[in-house]
Image: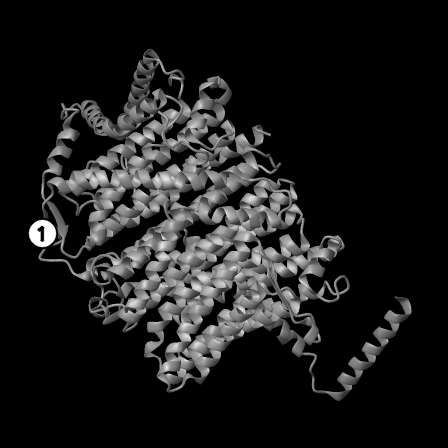
């Protein structure tokens, strides 16, 4: 019973706290750039406002256009059911969910790319074509990072990897972890469309990717997409925490342990957020055709991580 | 009893071909042909299910009446492939009802007659239990499909493509036949049972030669790189239902032959065979999907994507051999299950997509993606089923393609690194390569569906499409439903496939992963559906929907030409992988020399021929130049020829003296 409550709590935390995470990031970025910035609760207000607006649908669009945001939201939330957060277990944890997790996010990408093509404008195609480039090249390092960790922990489940890592001495696993962490960080930046791969705060750049895809969306559909995007950012952060720094997750069901777990999770999340904000405030966006090189770095690191684990595990 | 039913099944296929030939003017007979075909295929389905699920072995032996061994037997493996044939042939027949309607009387007759015989020949290949029966089916399969290609007209281009197809198929058949004939000293009657008994006792050298010949011969039919070039030539020019059969089933008969030869007849393959198959499979998968991505013609694209999927199947087969060679029978079984399941899945979704392409051609009269667009609004049933096919082939969870790809990943990960360690640290790296392939496939099918079905129509033909006939929609929806059903409940076929794998790989333990995926997918589907419904309630509660013009940056209006095209969609990825494509670009400026103010410019680029240019062209050139050199021997001078004869005799004498 307690396990079930914990699973539900961590999934709800992933889904409901996601807009807050976005708010905190933009607040922090504003502060770094010497601005006051909007309230951290602003994303919730935005969602509420969007949900009450009219839904503008291009007159050339088909049912796919309106179905896409719903599917994106559904699969992103479903992916949240695989992540360990407060304790090293999850709702749908299963052997081999590392692959299922990545593929569920791929469904989201597949449907939003189609939705954007349905608008019939140049921007939609532009966005989805570029998304295809980034996502395709990010998939291999993503899989390789997960493979390296799976070999290390001798289990192919995200929760299993977290459960194994908790009992390790940090210095025993650090070599592979550092390589894999950097690779996953690059992949996460590419997957969630942050600087230097994509700029989430603009609708005006000719090199935009995600914003170009959702340009035609408005009202409740846009709310779902924005929310899913926030959840995805939170998912990637939680994935990095769960895989590389699960220490502090509660292995017992006591209330105190859970409180500690939540507190530590927030601290770790804050560290990632600060890192992201510093990078986003100090680095310029990459040119479109430099992005593949950036992702190649991730692939190379992930390859090394797998080779190291495969050799040392013999 | 079942033997009789099986005989009736074969004869009724033959009878439907006969009726089609005789049909002529009679309306009744013309109606009878598809009916007879459907009835016999349903019967075949029942027989196949009996053998595949219950392991009932059916045997028919005609050896007594013929000078050579000629017999059929349906065991679990044959039953599985027979099931695969019947499952796809049924919707294909349904689809053909309206597809073949516009044919002339003669073409109609040829089409149905050859179609029935083509199905019969494929059935013959998978159920035969002697070499002669097998080779008879194998050759007929090639010839009949070539005949079906000719039904849709005749031109020099078609003949050239067809010639390449026939040449390569016969080279392949020769290799297969040679592999079988090498058994003669050990199994003189050339029945599979005898060969199986002799197989493991053959000398290692001979086993290797048989394997390599079989690999090349079946690989030719399957379309593995570098033997794939016939595939994108022959598949697009066939009538769409026939393309569906060729791609969905005919390629799988090669997988059947390879599996039968390697796992059943030869048995206990050494690990290095597996590494060879694995390596070639990977190259096939990567090249196949890269070429598919660069194509704009729907059926050629689908043909290249078949190359990719065959690559994945061979990767799984290679893994199975590697693991068996290292004594890891549990993982070998898992990889073999993945290969067989992917064969079934590919038959379903590629059949669906080829039939869908046929329906598009029927409605819009073009298969050029740059001319299409906006079909989803106009042809919703076709659109939805095509979307299911695209999602399935791109490996999206909840569709059947994902389940088999997941099994490939799991067997690779677990067998190579997780639970059993093979001393070959590069093996887990292949996960990255397969991930790249699946990422590319995802991009490719976003392109296919998005450009063809969404947005604005790019031509008048696409705007004024004919609606699709009922029977086409039904066939497509049936296949789409099958893709979805096997995606959510993969356990239905995975369990019997495991038992089948157990008959090919002795002492295989039950792989837990099969159970995991069978149990997990319904839950995942339930969660996705639940959250989807919640999201729908959340948004639809408030939403008022207004239909507006697409935003055009304030400009007066968008035209279809402002949309992204298939070429522009794939451009970024083609740019990254440009070293693979090496496109042939040609810019014609009229009048020449006036670069800045020309009267007209035309630009063409061919992107999918780099392989032929860099691999086959040099080989052909080498042969031709060697022949040129040899021609110098032909002086036309009688004295020179006498000298050759004298020298030849001298050499022979010397050889015989000292050898």
Q: Is residue A284 above or below residue B93?
A: above
Answer left or right for A88 relative to B330: left
Answer left or right for A81 relative to B144: left
Q: Residue furthest top?
A: A256
Residue A293: quarter of image:
top left
The residue nearer to you, when weighing B493 against A13, is: B493
Q: Residue furthest right?
A: B657
Q: Residue at x 23, y 72 (%)?
A: B599
Image spot of residue B467 (x, y percent) = 24, 68
The residue nearer to you, when weighing A5 against B399, is: A5
For the N terminus of chain B, the image quarter is bottom right
Q: Say which element carries label 1.
A: loop
Q: Report if residue B44 is visible in the image.
A: yes
Q: How is the image coloured?
A: one colour
The residue nearer to you, when weighing B515 against B220, is: B515
Q: Is residue A299 above or below residue A259?
A: below
Q: Residue at x 56, y 63 (%)?
A: B2
**Circle 1 chain:** B
Residue A105: quarter of image:
top left
Number of numbered discs on residues: 1
Q: Report if residue B227 is visible in the image.
A: no
Image spot of residue B631 (x, y percent) = 66, 78
Q: Residue at x 56, y 47 (%)?
A: B499
Q: Is residue B235 above or below residue B261?
A: below
Q: Report the residue marked by disc 1.
A: B554
For the C terminus of chain B, the image quarter is bottom right
Q: Residue at x 68, y 54 (%)?
A: B266
- Assess disc 1: are there few (<14), some (14-19) or many (≥20) residues with their C-alpha within 10 Å of its C-alpha: few
Image spot of residue B3 (x, y percent) = 58, 65
Q: Is residue A306 above or below residue A116?
A: above
Image spot of residue B215 (x, y percent) = 61, 58
The residue nearer to you, when weighing A32 against B444, is: B444
């Amino acid at each position: 019973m307690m396990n079930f409550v914990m699973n539900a709590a961590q999934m709800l935390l992933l889904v409901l706290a996601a807009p807050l995470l976005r708010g905190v990031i933009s607040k922090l970025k504003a502060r770094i750039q010497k601005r006051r910035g909007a309230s951290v609760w602003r994303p919730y207000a935005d969602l509420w406002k969007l949900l009450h607006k009219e839904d503008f649908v291009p007159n050339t669009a088909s049912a796919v256009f309106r179905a896409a945001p719903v599917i994106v939201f559904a699969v992103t939330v479903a992916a949240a059911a695989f992540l360990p957060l407060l304790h090293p277990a999850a709702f749908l944890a299963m052997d081999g969910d590392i692959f299922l997790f990545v593929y569920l996010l791929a469904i989201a990408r597949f449907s939003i790319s189609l939705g954007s093509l349905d608008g019939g404008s140049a921007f939609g195609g532009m966005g989805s074509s570029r998304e295809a480039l980034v996502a395709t090249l990010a998939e291999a390092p993503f899989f390789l990072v997960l493979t390296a960790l799976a070999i290390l922990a001798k289990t192919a489940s995200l929760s299993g990897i977290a459960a194994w890592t908790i009992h390790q001495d940090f210095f025993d696993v650090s070599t592979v972890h550092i390589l894999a962490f950097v690779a996953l960080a690059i992949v996460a930046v590419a997957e969630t469309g942050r600087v230097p791969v994509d700029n989430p705060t603009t609708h005006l750049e000719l090199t935009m990717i995600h914003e170009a895809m959702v340009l035609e969306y408005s009202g409740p559909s846009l709310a779902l997409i924005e929310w899913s995007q926030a959840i995805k950012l939170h998912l990637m952060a939680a994935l990095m925490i769960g895989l590389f720094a699960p220490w502090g997750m509660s292995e017992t069901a006591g209330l105190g342990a859970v409180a500690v777990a939540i507190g530590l999770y927030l601290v770790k999340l804050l560290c990632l957020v600060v890192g992201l904000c510093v990078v986003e405030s100090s680095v310029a966006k990459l040119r479109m055709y430099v992005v593949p090189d950036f992702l190649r770095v991730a692939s190379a690191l992930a390859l090394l991580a797998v080779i190291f684990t495969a050799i040392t595990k013999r | 009893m079942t033997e009789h039913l099986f005989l009736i099944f074969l004869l009724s296929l033959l009878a439907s071909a006969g009726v089609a030939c005789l049909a002529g003017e009679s309306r009744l007979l013309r109606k009878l042909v598809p009916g007879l075909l459907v009835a016999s295929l349903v019967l075949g389905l029942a027989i196949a299910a009996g053998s595949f699920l219950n392991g009932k072995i059916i045997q028919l032996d005609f050896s007594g009446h013929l000078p050579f061994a000629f017999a059929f037997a349906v065991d679990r493996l044959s039953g599985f492939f027979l099931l695969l044939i019947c499952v796809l042939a049924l919707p294909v027949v349904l689809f053909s009802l309206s597809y073949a309607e516009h044919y002339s009387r003669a073409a109609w007759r040829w089409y149905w007659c050859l179609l029935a015989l083509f199905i019969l020949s494929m059935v013959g290949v998978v159920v035969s239990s002697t070499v002669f029966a097998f080779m008879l089916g194998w050759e007929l399969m090639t010839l009949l499909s070539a005949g079906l290609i000719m039904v849709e007209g005749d031109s020099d281009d078609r003949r050239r493509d067809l010639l390449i197809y026939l040449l390569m198929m016969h080279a392949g058949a020769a290799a297969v036949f040679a592999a079988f004939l090498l058994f003669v000293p050990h199994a003189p009657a050339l029945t599979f049972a005898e060969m199986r008994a002799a197989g493991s006792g053959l000398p290692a050298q001979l086993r290797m030669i048989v394997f390599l010949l079989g690999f090349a011969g079946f690989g030719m039919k399957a379309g593995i790189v570098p033997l794939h070039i016939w595939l994108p030539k022959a598949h697009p020019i066939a009538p769409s239902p026939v393309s569906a059969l060729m791609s969905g089933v005919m390629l799988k008969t090669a997988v059947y032959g390879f599996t039968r030869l390697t796992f059943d007849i030869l048995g206990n393959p050494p690990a290095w065979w597996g590494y060879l198959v694995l390596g070639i499979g990977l190259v096939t998968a990567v090249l196949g999907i890269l070429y598919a991505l660069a194509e704009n013609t729907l059926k050629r694209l689908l043909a290249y994507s078949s190359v990719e999927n065959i690559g994945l199947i061979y990767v799984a087969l290679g893994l199975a051999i590697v693991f068996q060679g290292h004594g890891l029978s549990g993982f070998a079984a898992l990889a073999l299950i993945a290969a067989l399941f992917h064969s079934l899945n590919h038959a379903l979704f590629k059949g669906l997509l080829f039939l869908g392409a046929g329906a598009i051609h029927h409605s819009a009269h073009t298969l050029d993606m740059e001319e299409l667009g906006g079909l989803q609004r106009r042809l919703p049933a076709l659109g939805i089923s095509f979307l299911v096919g695209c999602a399935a082939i791109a490996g999206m969870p909840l569709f059947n393609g994902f389940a088999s790809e997941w099994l490939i990943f799991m067997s690779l990960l677990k067998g190579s690194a997780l639970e059993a360690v093979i001393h070959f640290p590069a093996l887990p790296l292949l996960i990255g390569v397969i991930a790249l392939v699946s990422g590319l496939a995802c991009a490719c099918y976003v392109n296919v569906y998005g450009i063809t079905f969404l947005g604005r129509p790019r031509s008048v033909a696409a705007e004024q499409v004919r609606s699709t006939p009922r029977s086409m929609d039904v066939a497509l929806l049936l296949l789409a439903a099958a893709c979805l059903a096997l995606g959510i409940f993969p356990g239905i076929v995975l369990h019997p496939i495991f038992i089948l794998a157990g008959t090919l790989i002795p002492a295989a333990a039950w792989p837990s992963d099969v159970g995991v995926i069978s149990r997990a997918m319904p839950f995942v589907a339930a969660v996705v559906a639940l959250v989807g419904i919640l999201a729908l309630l959340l948004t639809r509660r408030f939403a008022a929907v207004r239909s507006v013009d697409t935003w055009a940056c304030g400009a007066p209006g968008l035209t279809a030409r402002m949309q992204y095209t298939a070429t522009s969609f794939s451009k970024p990825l083609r740019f990254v992988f440009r070293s693979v494509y090496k496109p042939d670009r040609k810019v014609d400026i009229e009048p020449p020399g006036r670069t800045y103010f020309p009267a007209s410019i035309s630009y063409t680029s061919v992107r999918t021929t780099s392989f032929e240019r860099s691999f086959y062209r040099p080989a052909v050139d080498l042969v031709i130049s060697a022949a040129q050199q040899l021609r110098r021997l032909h002086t036309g001078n009688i004295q020179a020829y006498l000298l050759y004869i004298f020298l030849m005799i001298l050499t022979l004498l010397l050889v015989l003296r000292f050898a």
